[in-house]
Amino acid sequence: MPKVADPRLADKGRLAYEWARKHMPILVKSIERLERDRPLHGIRAGFCLHVTKETSVLVMGARMLGADVGLCAANPLTTQDDVAAFLASQGIDVYAWRNESMDEYYSCIRSVLSSRPATLTDDGSDMHVLYHREFKGVYTPIGGTEETTTGVTRLRALARDGILAYPIIAVNDAYTKHLFDNRYGTGQSTIDGILRATSMLLAGKTMVVAGYGWVGKGIASRARGMGAKVVVTEVDPIRALEAHMDGFAVMPMDEACRYADVIVTATGQINVVRGEHIRAMKDGVVLANAGHFDVEIDVRWLERNARGKRLVRENLEEYILDGRSIYLIARGRIANLVAAEGHPPEVMALSFANQLLSIVYLVRNHASMERKVYGVPGEIDRQVALNALDAMGIRIDEPTEEQVAYAGRWM
Ligand SMILES: NC(=O)c1ccc[n+]([C@@H]2O[C@H](COP(=O)([O-])OP(=O)(O)OC[C@H]3O[C@@H](n4cnc5c(N)ncnc54)[C@H](O)[C@@H]3O)[C@@H](O)[C@H]2O)c1
């Protein structure tokens, strides 16, 4: 039986859905273009995504294209219960509520997999991995898609080990996904999460951003815009150089942690902020994570070494060390989705247009695809960009025949 926290929240969830839909014309256009052909007719589509208002527009869109939809959360803490209730009221099989235990979280994913979806759409790959652990001998999906950097890394590891059971389209790799969602979406919503959790002034504060990938670049630039002094830490020399030339201070975490007022991790890596760093921090430092999993800050070290802990505001815990307090946002989980609402709809429209068109592509082309990780087909990426420009009323030039010919010459 589908399960949500409170079905009575459906009307509130409908308003959230309608608000998001109004701000996602790029996705709505893709849905409307395909609606007549109903390319997902007869397809059971499984989704493991953050259950937000933006996700509701995607899964309702999949239904409009003919799919029968099962939905669970991609994180135990990020479900918007009103949105889950609205989707359940529309006949979507939803298994998601905010504050699931880890057992409940996996049992919700299992519920979606038990209905044997033909396509699996994931954010972080917990559903893809659970399929390979428990359902591989039971049935084979025609294919899957993956939303985020960390999920794509895991799927590439499955493919490398020869275990991947179906083709994957790495939606994260589309230019119209990571250039905008990871950078502008996470940039804005992580700052939003920090502000909602702490209500602090960023102007004049020192914010350390660990990782200068797409997510880190977005956070660093938005924090600078709010007047923070931004320090970047990196392990990749090219990205460190890029951060330096973008005007940020670059230094190792050992050093950066001494100056920090706020530290945000955005690396996709484990234990980037460790005990030795926490010991060296000033009193009152705020720690937040924007990476997919809650492994970037060593929360277990804090749990073991703090003399006490208390919840001082929603999504903000104070760890009391000898004479100092360290504040942790959202238990070290993805701060922009737990302490705020995730990316704004305008940016998720790009990501989810890529998702929807990639699912349709899989349904149409899976017979000729291998069990490997594919990028998003170039024509989809381009179409999403054209739709986005169109929705924003922006026109661009076309190359002249002379320019096309010039670009093809070798002398
Ligand atoms: N919060 C969100 O809504 C959201 C959105 C998109 C992606 N993500 C997640 O954010 C994480 C980063 O994604 P991305 O697209 O920026 O990835 P990316 O690969 O572009 O960037 C990660 C960067 O971190 C650096 N790094 C790795 N280990 C490090 C360490 N120990 N110290 C400092 N830097 C280190 C890498 O060199 C790289 O430059 C992933 O887990 C991704 O899934 C979160």
Image: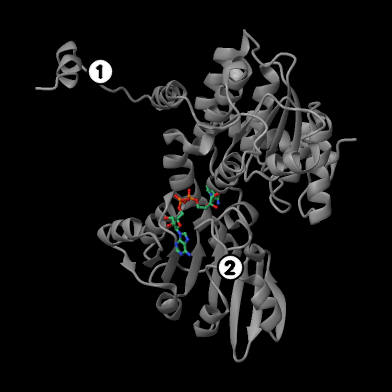
Ligand 1 has an atom within 8 Å of the beta carbon of the residue at disc 2: no
Pick the front one: 395 or 275: 275
x, y percentage for residue 191? 50, 57
Q: Position of residue 106 (x, y in %)?
A: 79, 48
Quarter that holds the N terminus? top right
Q: Which mark is residue 398?
A: 1
Secondary element type, mark 2: loop
- Residue at 62% across / 62% down in the picture? 295
Q: Quadrant of residue 202?
A: bottom left
Q: Which residue is mark 2?
A: 297
x and y, in percent, of residue 188 in the image: 47, 51
**Mark 2 Cα within 10 Å, few/some/many (few <14, many 20+)?**
many
Asked if residue 347 is positioned above or below residue 97 in the image, the reply reads above
Whole-number angstrom distance, CA of label 2 to CA of label 1:
48 Å
Q: Nearer the viewer, residue 172 or 157?
A: 157
Whether the residue carrying mark 1 lies under 8 Å from ligand 1 is answered with no
Horizontally, is 199 left or right of 208 in the view? right
In which quadrant will I find the C terminus?
top left
> Is residue 271 in view?
yes
Position of residue 373 measured from the top left corner of the image (x, y, whole percent): 55, 34
Q: Place residue 395 in its image quadrant.
A: top left
